[in-house]
Amino acid sequence: VLFLAYFAMQVIYARRKYKISPPETTGHPEFERTFRAQANCSEYFPIFISVLWVAGIFFHQGVTAACGLLYLYTRLKYFQGYTVAAQGRLAPLYTSAWLLWLLVGLALAGLLAHFLWP
């Protein structure tokens, strides 16, 4: 939640800096990148929280927590890279996507182990 608040505050600062009033979402390229980075991170947050929760309950809390922290770090790097240049988002984007798929796999493995094997 702190990450989402930080991202939202960066959009507010960019709006003030470039004098872009809500509900407008276009204007200076740096504002547009900041806005898109915040929107992209917000779109993936419910998926992340859901698979983190399921993997933590049914797989292993420690492994899940480590993956979750790495995911949050890569999303922060994604946001910071995207606000500077569109190309700056790519490496953290691929890493965060890989971590999200890993969490999905851990959640599925935990669910299968819990419900199929006694």
Image: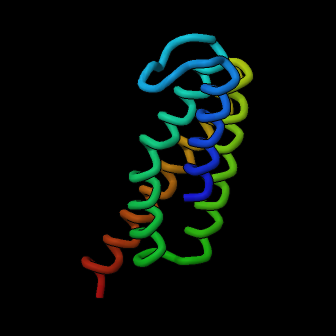
Quarter of the figure with the N terminus: bottom right
Front residue of 47/115: it is: 47
Callout count: 0
Locate residue 93: give its quadrant.
Answer: top right
| Residue 58 pos. (x, y %) | 40, 77
| Residue 11 pos. (x, y %) | 60, 33
Front residue of 51/116: it is: 51
Q: Is residue 73 above or below residue 89?
A: below
Residue 86 visible in the displayed image? no
Q: Is residue 100 above or below residue 94?
A: below
Q: Is residue 100 above or below residue 69?
A: above
Taking the view exactly as shown, the residue that stands out farthest to the bottom is: 118
Quarter of the figure with the C terminus: bottom left
Q: Residue at x 66, y 55 (%)?
A: 70
Locate residue 51: give its quadrant.
Answer: bottom left
Residue 69 visible in the displayed image? yes
Q: Is residue 76 left or right of residue 108?
A: right
Front residue of 84/28: it is: 28
Front residue of 70/28: it is: 28
Q: Is residue 24 left or right of residue 77?
A: left
| Residue 107 pos. (x, y %) | 41, 65
Q: Is residue 59 left or right of residue 77?
A: left
| Residue 42 pos. (x, y %) | 47, 43
Q: Residue at x 64, y 48 (%)?
A: 6
The colour mode here is rainbow
Q: Residue at x 61, y 76 (%)?
A: 62
Locate residue 32: give its quadrant.
Answer: top right
